[in-house]
Image (cartoon, rainbow, N blue to C red):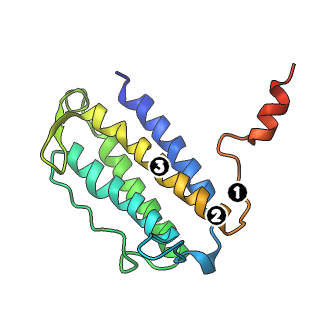
Amino acid sequence: MYDLPTFLDYWENVRTRTKRVAACIPEDRMEWVPGEGRWSFGDILRHLAGIERGMYAETVAGRPSAYRGHTREIADGSEAIFAYMDRCHAESMEILRGLTEAQWSGKCLTPALTPITTWKWLRLMPEHEAHHRGQLYHMLATLGVKTPPIYGMTEEQVLERSKE
């Protein structure tokens, strides 16, 4: 188990990496979809913001999930989407910072009403974010958009530095 301050620092870094790749999305491609029935960049970003605030933050605070979905009615256009992400994240962080040690190590209920230790539930949030961040990278690559390396180096740079 790890403590809440360590988790919060980690979570801030995870979100920063997502925002860095999201900043590469061309404005005119925000609602582009890679195929029928697929999500757009905007859908993914609205989903990440809404899940963080409406599901994770609410459930660890002892309330039922209040996730609203990922439609354009929530936020339309890059500026509105990024503002929605920032607002949801700030509200979530305020809730998370307010967790007591008893809440952190105690149980919360998932939307399926399954009891789970709060810190174990919250460690799924970065995993969920990484899954969708991978989609963003793949979709941007499909469009030929250059993206920053996730941890500062490309695979080619790591290979070069790994040679004897």
**In what quadrant of the picture does the C terminus appear?**
top right
Residue 61, x across and y down, in percent: 21, 45
Instruction: Tell me what residue is drawn at x 41 percent, y 74 percent.
Output: 37
Q: Which residue occupies 54% across, 52% down?
A: 134
Residue 47, quarter of picture: bottom left
- Picture layout, residue 163 above or below residue 31: above
Which sits in the foreground, 92 or 137?
137
Residue located beneath label 3 in the image:
131
Q: CA distance from mark 3 to mark 2?
A: 15 Å
> Dot 1, how many residues are within 10 Å of its Cα: few (below 14), some (14-19), or many (20+)?
some
Estimate how packed mark 2 is, as few (under 14), some (14 to 19) or many (20 or more) residues with alpha carbons within 10 Å: many
The span from disc 1 to disc 2 (Cα, nearest Å) is 8 Å
For residue 147, which numbered disc appears in the image?
Answer: 1
Q: Amino acid at mark 3?
A: His
What residue type is disc 2 on? Leu
Asked if residue 120 lies left or right of residue 76, the reply is left
